Amino acid sequence: MKLTLKVWRQKSANDKGKIETYPIDNISEHMSFLEMMDVLNEQLITEGKIPVSFDHDCREGICGMCSMHINGEPHGPDRGVATCQLHMRKFKDGDTIYIEPFRAKGFPIIKDLVVDRSAFDRIQHAGGFVSVNTSGNTQDANALPIPKADADTAFDSATCIGCGACVAACKNASAMLFVSAKVSQFSLLPQGKVEAKRRVLHMVEQMDKEGFGNCTNTGACEVECPKGISLENIARMNREYLKASVSSSK
Amino acid sequence: MATLDAKIPAGPIKDKWTKHKNDINLVNPANKRLIDIIVVGTGLAGGAAAASLAEMGYSVKAFCFQDSPRRAHSIAAQGGINAAKNYQNDGDSIYRLFYDTVKGGDYRSREANVYRLAEVSGNIIDQCVAQGVPFAREYGGLLDNRSFGGVLVSRTFYAKGQTGQQLLLGAYSAMNRQIGKGKIKMYNRHEMLELVKVDGKARGIIARNLVTGAVESHSAHAVVIASGGYGNVFFLSTNAMGSNTTAAWRVHKKGAYFANPCYTQIHPTCIPRSGDYQSKLTLMSESLRNDGRIWVPKNIDDIEAIRSGKIKPVQIAEENRDYYLERRYPAFGNLVPRDVASRAAKERCDAGYGVNATGEAVYLDFASAIKRYGKEKAIVTGEENPSDSRIIELGEGVIEDKYGNLFQMYEKITDDNPYKTPMQIYPAVHYTMGGIWVDYNLMTSVPGCYAAGEANFSDHGANRLGASALMQGLADGYFVLPYTIGDYLADDIRTGEIPTDSTEFKEAEEAVKARITKFMDNKGTKSVDHFHKLLGKIMWDKVGMARNEKHLKEAIAEIRVVREEFYKNVLIPGGAMELNPELEKALRVEDFLELGELFACDALARTESCGGHFREESVELDGPQKGEAKRDDTNFAYVSAWEWTGDPGQAKLHKEELEFNDIELKQRSYK
């Protein structure tokens, strides 16, 4: 198929940036969106132009590195997938496709479609862990039975790939879904209980410091999340936060 | 030809590791903070090592090329992690895991290392559970297990089809705790481009900041390479796009021997390629072979009808299907090891029975499992006389619980519904058993330079069993390297900080800058991918699943031509002092082009067939094993460790003879 691509080009963090138009032809419906971008870049290189920079790595929807805003949606029109698993069969011959970076105060642009998501790492540094040292003498794994339902729900929260689509989809650029997924995973498991208060207070404090907005329950994050992380996580984090705030002075 | 000393401790195999840990030198806690360790790569091995070393008190500097350590490609591992816990009471033990791993590796791994791996496997599960890794559980709240190819017990722990993700996020969380404390300094979006040696010892690295383009010197008392495997030498593989050999290859060029480069795992269950634009291949977890049956049509007429779309696979009657793994290997059936399953698929497709347009696909069919599970479920839930469609509905629910995310991924990529029609699969490059040669302490042949995880060579021999990669990465990172590195560092407590203004650092930095300038100034016309694809095609066609002397010699000559052409004609747009993905790729492909040649030379020198390395000249000619791979223990029971001499085609071979004292070498039969 034949497409018109409108791609955000920005040389560096300080450059103003603008949309450039690129016509592209011979795109197969079996291609992934990123393979279509590869074709565009090969074309640009042949024409002596600078190819479009974009983040990507595993190309199977699990590393969370790819991050485009496609036709106004993070990871594009398909549901339950990252950009790398979006296929061109979701588009029609003759379509115009707008491709922009994730936009949020907490995710400054580095170049073209590449943004800096290190704020997510810093939120995890603040408390996204159980404080256990490596040791050959931790207790036997089966000494701590965990109800299957709790383990399964914790797993669902833990499948977050940290891509940042939730932030990009939110009108407040809120990171609540991302942060609450980690808080939920540990609050559902006995291993995480000991540090529960400290964890939620510190992670939320860091989240605010990074400039992410608050949650106003629009639910856009849940819709765009490639892993289907549920809004229930935010409710759970709010409960954890309230509990920790009234019962602890850190 | 020199022989190599692997420094395997003396004594009975079951006591070696304990005794060794008691014998080696320790570093006083107060001195550990004066010692810097660089860890390159933040996957299971690198992440676990960085976190553990920092917990012990060392000052760690960790590097990854991705934007966060959580993105390392360990994240994509699907199926599970082995451990000899014997929770299922099926007779599993450390010895049995050790035995299966050595046998599965076709007797080309180092016994002492594998035994240690099996010994610490249980600790890994304990450690991960303590970190809050949400493994699959049974209703009683205890951990669930499943079985994997090549073994007869259920010892695989898993978290749906996302085990690697959950284990990596566990290691990442342990790292985060140390980063928050300032014990790990994390360098994201940095790529190691050179190892720096001072007085013969590894003392630092040169890395490029991928955002600013700055070439930086970083010093340490020891350097750990945990940069993964080199499967992307084939261009198409299940590896991530950024996975590369550069850190490993640069260490090799500074004196570390490269072991068994030709041992590559071609994984049997991947989604077949669909066109020339294809950028990578996607794995479907081997766990699917627990319930999926592999087949192709028996009659060549049916093949043509299927390819032209006249009939659908579900219309082919049971008696007209060839379940070739069940036919050839009745004892293991669909659960034969990966190398055996891959070659069997290739054999059928080469014979003309491939089921898609390219002729490179076989079916993986869940219809029988869906019926079986549906019936079981109806009994459990007390439904009487369920209809066939109800049974299928119930069965599909069970399959969804087990493999839901894999089925969804398959459907997203192929637009086919695998609940209703069999999956199409074909083998693809997945894992590299070869890697940097290390001794028992995981130290390379460069003093102070270590290699862990897929980047080293030691535990999987010529073929890796399913669910063993995660085990080895975490064993190295959590439980082996943090101890063994202390033995070396005990001598460094008075050394003090290593300065980066020495001649050695300056020269290394200049050399890296010169390489970058050479690429930027090149007046070529072709993209980096153009050359990478050429290399990949040579590797797949001539150094792939089946190898012979003629093709290997051709491959070596052809790779040299591509390499020459690459230097002459590659075009790198943009500048060096900015984010420049084309420059990053060029620096990686440069190293793949050298590694590819050594890889082919290694395959040429090993005239036996073993594990993933199949030489067409070395097969059983008659008897019950007719047509199967023929190993040659008399002449090839050694590790090939290659020393860099300035040209990959002229590398010098060192042999580490493999001694098997606790396992009898036998023909690997899965019949």
Image: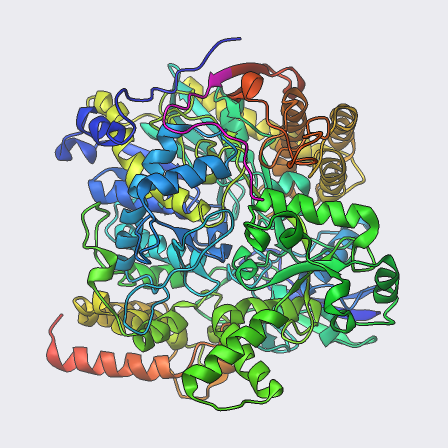
Q: Magenta region's main secondary structure?
A: loop
Asked if residue A67 lies left or right of residue B155, the reply is: right
**Residue ranking furthest to the front:** B623
Q: Position of residue B251 (x, y in %)?
A: 49, 26
Q: Nearer the viewer, residue B258 or B609?
A: B609
Give the colour scheme of this rendering: rainbow
On screen, A244 above or below B32?
Answer: below
**Number of dots carrying numbers:** 0
Above or below B271: residue B386? below
Q: Which residues are magenta?
A: B655-671
Q: In the image, is B498 to the left or to the right of A119?
A: left
Which of the two residues, B544 or A92, is positioned nearer the viewer here? Answer: B544
* Residue B319 visible in the shown view: yes
* Percent position of residue B380, x then y: 41, 82
Left-right relation of B600 to A108: right
- Identify which residue is drawn at 30% across, 28% down: B13
Taking the magenta stretch, the answer to whether it contains residue B111 is no
Q: Quadrant of residue B310?
A: bottom right
Q: Residue at point 33% right, 58% down?
A: B88
The quadrant in which residue A32 appears is bottom right
Quarter of the image containing the C terminus of chain B?
top right
Q: Position of residue B640 (x, y in %)?
A: 54, 21
Is residue A169 among the parts visible in the rendering? no
Give residue B128's position: percent from left, percent from top: 30, 55
Magenta-drawn stretch contains B667: yes
Give the residue drawn at x 52%, y 36%: B433
- B1 vs B97, nearest the viewer: B97
Q: In the figure, B394 relative to B93: above or below?
A: below
Q: Nearer the viewer, residue B267 or B524?
A: B267
